[in-house]
Image: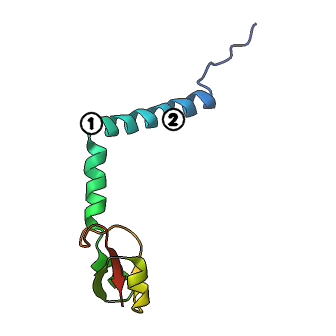
Amino acid sequence: MPSKKAQSISINTIIIAAIALAVLVVLFIIFTGRFKIFSEGISSTASCTKTCEIAGKTTIGSSQTKEGCTSGGYTYMPGEYGDVQKNYVCCCS
């Protein structure tokens, strides 16, 4: 009698299908505008005050340049913050 071999999906096929599904989900998020909503939520939580508090420092405000912040003996916190004017940097003491 001939032996019957069961046919199954190979592991490679399953992995390729999972990657394809992940790519489709990312494309769906990007094209429906959900990614913009997500990124706005992330950027709105960034504040100079919170960053200084996490670092164990107090906020002194902002300076126009990194050098202006550090020359005054303060700590420059890199990044863009919602509570700091455009073209200014976050300074902590």
User: Which of the pair 7/61 is nearer the observer?
Assistant: 61
Percent x, y for residue 43? 30, 61
Amino acid type assigned to the residue bearing label 2 in the image: Ile
Left or right position of 82 against 7: left
Percent x, y for residue 7? 62, 18
For numbered disc 2, what is the local secondary structure? helix
Mark 1 sits on what residue? 32
Q: Earlier in the sequence, mark 1 or mark 2?
A: 2
Q: Residue at x 43, y 81 (%)?
A: 67
Q: Residue at x 42, y 92 (%)?
A: 73
Check whether the beta carbons of the residues at disc 1 and disc 2 lie within 8 A of each other. no
Left or right position of 20 against 65: right
Q: Quadrant of the C terminus?
A: bottom left
Percent x, y for residue 47? 28, 73
For numbered disc 1, what is the local secondary structure? helix
**Residue 19 image label:** 2
